[in-house]
Amino acid sequence: MIKKIGLLILVVIMLVSMLGCSFSKQKRLIGTWVSPYADNQKLEIRTEELRFNYRRFDYVVKGNKLYLEETFPNKSLIGEMPFKLSGDTLTIDLGETFSGFFYGCSGKVKLQRQE
């Protein structure tokens, strides 16, 4: 019985730790990110939504991936976007699903945090 309680406590601690890491990562992602090569290429990450220029998405952060579901102008596009955050530089991998969202860009895109 004591072993089971100890195991349960360990599992709860691990889950809280994992959730805390995801929340912390999401908090660091929040802000406006722009391409250093074109002012009109903007990614805005807010608490409850993400915007590629004018396209709105609901999102969830899991590990090093953003899971997106388009909410405006329609609810048809769903996909995942791997990312790497290093200080004030955010690198996103558009993949096939989001290719072209940054005015024709595809593959990996580096963005800088806008002050």
Image (cartoon, rainbow, N blue to C red):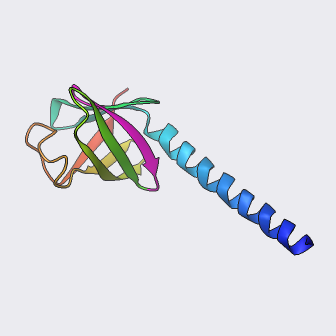
**Residue ID at (41%, 55%):** 64
Q: Is residue 115 left or right of residue 21?
A: left
Name the residue at 91% across, 72% down: 1
Q: Position of residue 70 (x, y in %)?
A: 27, 35
Q: Nearer the viewer, residue 77 or 115?
A: 77
Can you say which quadrant of the picture contains the C terminus?
A: top left
Residue 111, how many percent across, how many down? 27, 41
Which quadrant of the structure image shows residue 50?
top left
One can see residue 96 in this view: yes
Residue 105 is covered by the magenta coloring: no
Query: Which corner quadrant of the image does residue 101 belong to?
Result: top left
Q: Which residue, as the protein is rendered here, is positioned at the far right?
A: 2
Looking at the picture, does residue 24 appear above or below residue 5?
A: above
Residue 87 seen in this snapshot? no
User: Does 102 sit above or below residue 6?
Assistant: above
Residue 43 drawn above or below residue 98: above
Count of picture labels: 0
Q: Residue furthest left?
A: 104
What is the x, y in percent for residue 93?
A: 25, 53
Name the residue: 14% across, 48% down. Answer: 99
Residue 41: give x, y in percent of width and height. Answer: 18, 32
Is residue 66 shown left or right of residue 99?
Answer: right
Secondary structure character of the magenta stretch overall: strand
Whether residue 105 sits left or right of residue 60 in the image: it is left
Q: Quadrant of residue 34?
A: top left
Task: Tell me if residue 55 is in the magenta stretch.
Answer: yes
Q: What is the span of residues highlighted in magenta in the rendered image? A: 51-63
Q: Nearer the viewer, residue 70 or 86?
A: 70
